[in-house]
Image (tube, rainbow, N blue to C red):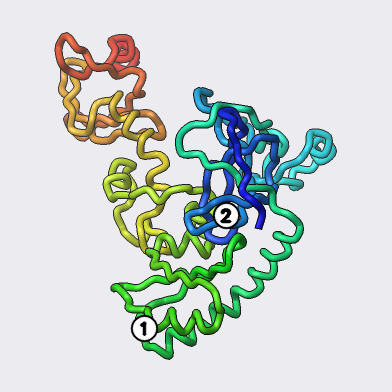
Amino acid sequence: MKQKAVHDEEWAYVYVVKNPSYNDVTLCAWDSVLYAGTPVVYDTRFGLDLGIVVGPAPVPGKGYVPGPAEVRGACLRFSDENEDEESAGDENAHQCDSCFRCQIAREPERIRVSGDVDWIDHLATPSEMARYGENASREEEAIKICREKIRKHGLSMKLVTTHFLLGEPKVIFFFTADDRVDFRELVKDLVSVFRMRIELRQIGVRDESRLIGGLSVCGRDYCCHLMTREMDPVTIKMAKEQNLSLNSMKISGPCGRLLCCLAYEYDYYMEEKASCPPEGTKLRLDHELWRVTEVNILSRKITVSGSEGRTISIPFDEVFFNSDSGFWEVSEEYQEELFSS
């Protein structure tokens, strides 16, 4: 095995590295420029293993750069400008009008390394890539053997997947179980078969989805499998604040837990709601009290109801909190325009 490189530099290029076997995403540093798709060997929580460079990590201190508004759909295809110009006349060529602009390949930047950033051990060699392919082909057989041993010992556990480490003779078996499992005898049987270190790791149902992947209700890969680095908690409050159905069948993923994407827009909803009156607030319009019955974040309008079942939709921009009176109010200009017509 290669000797681990020693890095004394404080400045380096930092990359997002993903493990293709169990989908861990890590920030790793290297002292030269690497591009997406480069195979590397780095220190994972299980030991040295193969990783694939996804791209350069976001540079601290730089603001958010939104994507182009003209993109018509999700597109993960990289292409150069010339190739895109050739297919510009064909609307069905790709999912969006501007492939080379919706996925811009950023050049890595040399930054000061700090925080939770590990160094890449070394670039993967052709022999290591060949060994990785051999290990991958052995994993299917390892799953069959382990499942036979589980049935033999009558253990209440579900084997999800298995993985042979690249950097050392070690095989990891991932499984789910409702309770604690005494698998000491199982480990002895597996050691006698594989003649290497055995690790059995119990995971949850969300981790199972993250490992094996699949398509979610949106038609795309599971977020936990494709891009999410950490499994953040998702609560029913997030669905309530977004005015979504509280039917568990509609807001749960295939893993049986609440959809991860419920957390994506939660902060935005909370920020927007802080700048407008909450439901139940009384507003004075045309010498009459109206009650806020709905706050629609997407249309950026509030709906107020008055006497005789009358309702009015008012844009957020026309409503403000008067700190002097301590009440929410509607701009006089908007009231004049509304009631003069």
Q: 332 or 259: nearer the eye?
A: 259
Residue at image location 65% in from the left, 50% down from the top: 40
Q: Which residue is mark 2?
A: 19
Residue at image location 29% in from the left, 49% down from the top: 235
Position above or below: 164 against 23: below
Position above or below: 194 against 70: below
Q: Residue type at mark 2?
A: Asn
Q: 203 or 33: nearer the eye?
A: 33
Indicate left or right for 229 with 40 as reference: left
Indicate left or right for 28 with 151 as reference: right
Report whether residue 106 is seen.
Answer: yes
Tell me the element at label 2.
loop
Residue 298 screen position, x and y as percent: 41, 34
Q: Quadrant of residue 220?
A: bottom right
Residue 324 screen position, x and y as percent: 16, 9
Q: 312 or 54: nearer the eye?
A: 54
The C terminus - image quarter = top left
Q: Which residue is mark 1?
A: 155
The N terminus - image quarter = bottom right
Q: Quadrant of residue 281?
A: top left
Q: Residue type at mark 1?
A: Leu
Cβ atoms under marks 2 and 1 closer than 8 Å: no
